Image (cartoon, coloured by chain):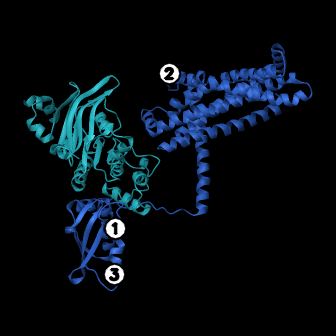
Chain colours: A blue, B cyan
Amino acid sequence: MAPSEIKIEKGPAGSLRLNLVGEWKLGNGIPAADSVLAGLDAGEKISGLCFDSGRLLGWDSALLIFLVKLFAICQQGGIAVDQSGLPAGVRKLVELASPDNQRSGVTRGTKRPPFLERVADAAFDQLRGFTEMLAFIGEVTLAFGKMLRGRADFRRLDLFVTIQETGAQALPIVTLISLLVGMIFAFIAAIQLKLFGAQIYVADVVGIGMVRVMGAIMTGIIMSGRTGAAFAAQLGTMQVNEEIDALETLGLSPVEFLVLPRMLALMLMMPLLCVYSDLMGVLGGMIVGVGMLDLGVMEYVHQTRAALNLTHFFVGMFHCFVFGILIAISGCLRGLQCERSASAVGYAATSAVVTGIVSIVVATLIITLSCEVLGI
Amino acid sequence: MNEPASVKDAIIDVRGLEMSYGSFVLMRDLNFTINRGDIFIIMGGSGCGKSTLLKHLVGLKRPASGQIIYNGSSYWESAPEEQERLKRRFGTLFQSGALWSSMTLGENVAMPLEQYTDLPPAIIRELVSFKLSLVGLGGFEDFYPAEISGGMKKRAGLARAMSLDPDLLFFDEPSAGLDPISARLLDDLIIELSESLGTTVVVVTHELASIFAIGTNSVFLDPEVKTMTACGDPKQLLKESPDPKVINFLTRGAGAQQR
């Protein structure tokens, strides 16, 4: 490729003729626009600029950005530019890109606000997030009340599909995790209890631990990662595609139509999953107890039944019922708060899981403390 | 290259192309040539496979049979590196812009430049601002796609498609969803780009106004016989085509009564 070159000829009365020579293409070393005039400015007054493109072999955007910059400099310096020597295509494109053809006043300042302002903004954002959450919980409560009176609008099919997704389809992962957690529990307990020859009490530890709280927490965390994130991604994508707006223009409340079936499904399915998880946890404990601690199967079952009572069982189910509501609310809230871009959907899913898990842990603490105080 | 003289200025040569989804054949026996500097229109009623044909031309979909030849080399018979090199000479504008929503307009336009060239960042910034100015979006570098209107998204998509100074620009329904004035402006822009830069443009559209305003060559797809039934300058086709379906399409159905 012939290199791009610029040859400057001085004409009469301070006018300049720029000869564009060679191939003006990207990656070909284009001269800087400001250097053209800078070299001459000393003492000389330039009144006009014209071009000769007779020896121009080829051009692309490189020439265009050079000219746009040069013209801007000329305009600042009050130098008249005669474009007639440029190829017609170049003239047209430079004209299209000229500032007169742009909307004015849109450029954004990239200035960073001062530190304190950013801190305050972040604090206000948190506050706004909190009020939004409260408003959302309020809306969900109202919608729930409406549903109890049988007047909420949602498709029954949605409810059943969500029940299937959050119930039956979650069984494999709940099985795996609960079984393993039960086994881990048994291992940890066995190490200590073996010292006293009290291996049989492994059944008590695993039974009470799983049924009262761990089954519920594990189910909650699994469902938060699995279902909470899915809710947020679904609703977030609907937000991006303006599907939520479409519902609202039909007069359908997104909270009733989308949030309610999801919350209902989780409220119904979570306690059932919890029972299943308890059972799997106990089974995991039994595998360790029978396989490693030489306990008999019936012995283990009897010990577990003696350790457990219905109170433990209901406390566990209550945990899971509450977790179901929390997961549904955090998933749907983050989904509905989603902004309109692909990365916002990812952020909504992440945020739903974080919110879900944090609220599960906090709720567990509150329920455990309450049980302690109430002597349950 | 030892090409015959008639094929010399052909930038795309489609030979015996058959398009299908699985066993469902959409179109067969497509033979046409797109010459350098053409504004080539792919027209036909809804669902006839216009967009699918475009997907074949940009190398997104593999033909069921037949060849698509760019500058003398068959796309699907080339090595993957060669395909990549060919694709870099294409710019595609999708129906709704298909801007990457988590990037600003400036980042969208800069991305192909950053990936495929080793230009310094300052030049890239100037190029981005110039390309956006070309489509009338100067100053919108820091806006996100969600913050601008549909027509602006389309124009920003065009700026991105043009970022590498492509030889070939593909447009999928450029005027769909635009108001008549914006659609007209976009048509003018297409003509200016084609004339000034010598870019070859392939447009899928069924907007008659656009077809006659910009088209210098075209192909008409007929879904009933599953092949192309006309080929040539749309203005010429309107006058001379013997096929009543083509006339009917080009006159918005008025041709049937006239003839």
- Mark 2, Cα crowd under 10 Å, few <14 / some 14-19 / many 20+, is few
The residue carrying mark 1 is: A69
The amino acid marked with disc number 2 is: Leu
What kind of element bears circle 2?
A: helix
What kind of element bears circle 3?
A: loop
Is residue B162 or residue B212 the one in the foreground? Answer: B162
The residue carrying mark 3 is: A41
The amino acid marked with disc number 1 is: Lys
Mark 3 or 2: in front is 3
Numbered badge on residue A157: 2
Mark 1 or 2: in front is 1
Q: Quadrant of residue B69?
A: top left
Q: Is residue B207 left or right of residue A329?
A: left
Mark 3 / mark 2, whichever is N-terminal: 3
Residue positioned most to the top: A298
Residue B205 image offset from top left, x and y in percent = 25, 39
Mark 1 / mark 2, whichever is N-terminal: 1
Q: Are marks 3 and 2 on the same chain?
A: yes
